[in-house]
Structures are given as C-alpha cells and as structure tokens.
Image: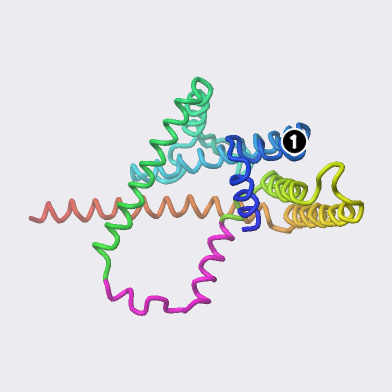
Amino acid sequence: MLSVFCYTEFAVEIPVAGGSFAYLRVELGDVAAFIAAANLILESIIGTAAVARSWTSYFASLINKPASALRIQTSLKDGYNELDPIAVVVIAVTATMAILSAKGTSRINWVASAIHVVVIAFVIVAGFIHANPSNLTPFMPHGVPGVFQAAAIVLDVLSSLLSISTLFIFMMMAIALLVRRYYVKGVTTRSHALRLLVFLLVIIASSAGIAAYWGTTPGREDELKDYGDAADDAADEKATAKTADVERASAGDGGR
C-alpha cells in the first residue's frame, strides 16, 4: 500500500510514460534507472514464464484434459521434469509482437483489457442472475474480521508471486520520493540532510532484512511449488467435473 502511494504521487507530479524507470531516472539519475531497468527485465522474465506455464494448465482444463496433459514428461528431477512447448510458443509470439511494433502492442493490450473487463462483467452479471438470494443473508456471516481474513488469504497468495526484484523496485521508489521531498542540492541544510540519510538507511536496512528473511525462510521453495501444484490440481478437478457433466448429459440423452 505504501508503494502504491509512492507511485501515485510520482504519477501526479511526473505524468510521463515509463513508470518506475522514468521516475527513478528523474530523481536518482541514470545509474539508479539502469539498475531498476535490469530488475524490471528480470521480473518480467520470471513473471512471463510463470504466466505462460499457467496458461497451458488452463488451456488443458478448457479441453477437458489434465493440467499436465499438454506438457512433455522427461526424466529430470521432480518439479523440473515437464517441458512446456505451448508456453514457449506463447512467449515467442508475444515477444515477437512486442518487438515488431510498440504501437501495435499497445493496441493489443487495449483490446485484451477491454475483453477482460467484458468477461469480468459477464461473470458478475451471470453470477447474480443464477445466484440464490438467500446466500446474501447474512451478507457478512463472519463480520468485518472475516472480510480482512479473506483479504489476507488473497494477499498471501499474491506474496508468493512477488520476487526480490519487485521488492527492490519498491524500495527504490520510496527512496526517490524522499529525495524529491527533502533534498535540493545547495538548498537543504546539513541537519535536514542528516535526517534524510537516517530515513534512507532505515528504508534500505528494512528492505534488506525483509529480502533476507524472505530468501532464508525454511520451506519457501516448497510453498511456491505447492502453490503451483495446487493450481494444477484445481485445473485437473475442473476438467474432471466438466467431463462428468458431459457424461451425465450424454447418458440422459441416451435414456430419452
């Protein structure tokens, strides 16, 4: 949430394209911007690979197949023994589109975002149409604490998708905002400069401590792997349920 405030303030005061790279370049210089760009590229590579792999799982469930049905099984170590050619094709196609035309990529993103909004709206409307109104009473069966507990579960899932590079960018944005607010070369007094330095050290130390704890927590890799396995299991269950529905419908047609 604090990072969101930082981004919002920069977006209002520096309304240019480029996001965190542009903001850090303006406030901290080219070196900080280069480091941020390297982290963003690393984050994009890891995130794109994860999303492409999940795309394969959901596509398999769409055609009533197990999540790993479209992957190639190998003799490598468990957890690394599935080759995903569909994910490779998806990444290659999207990367080629991004390289060929920035304007074309922007248009595709606009169309994809519009489709996402339409699909979400359809799901919400269809859900309310077929919902049982009695389920809305009581509206919050566990009260306000239940709402926050449910939100905490979602945040815990999202935290599994964050990387060290993301946390590093968040730290840099906080530093850049402090520098923008409390330091002007030749104007800032020595006492204010010392206060700024203390705050910067606190931010860097806390970010480094969180990153170290994140990386050294026992079972962290197993947690991420379990999350991926849970997504695959959910896709398998969905495909099984759809197959059972089709079989029941076919049996009903045969009986008639």
Q: Is residue 33 magenta?
A: no
| Residue at the image position 55 percent from the left and 64 percent from the top | 153
Give amino acid for label 1: Ile
**Residue 35 relative to residue 2: left or right:** right
**Residue 60 relative to residue 248: left or right:** right
- Counting from the top left corner in percent of width and height, residue 18 is at 60, 35
- Counting from the top left corner in percent of width and height, residue 164 is at 70, 47
Crowdedness near tag 1: few (<14), some (14–19) or many (≥20) residues, C-alpha within 10 Å? some
Q: Is residue 155 magenta?
A: yes
In the image shown, does 216 or 243 lie closer to the viewer? 216
Q: Looking at the rendering, which quadrant does residue 214 occupy?
A: bottom right
In the image, farthest residue toward the top: 100
Q: Which residue position is annotated with label 1?
A: 35
Residue 134, placed above or below residue 46: below
Question: Start and end of the magenta stretch?
Answer: 133-157
Which secondary structure, mark 1?
A: helix
In the image shown, does 146 or 171 lie closer to the viewer? 171
- Counting from the top left corner in percent of width and height, residue 51 is at 52, 41
| Residue at the image position 34 percent from the left and 48 percent from the top | 119
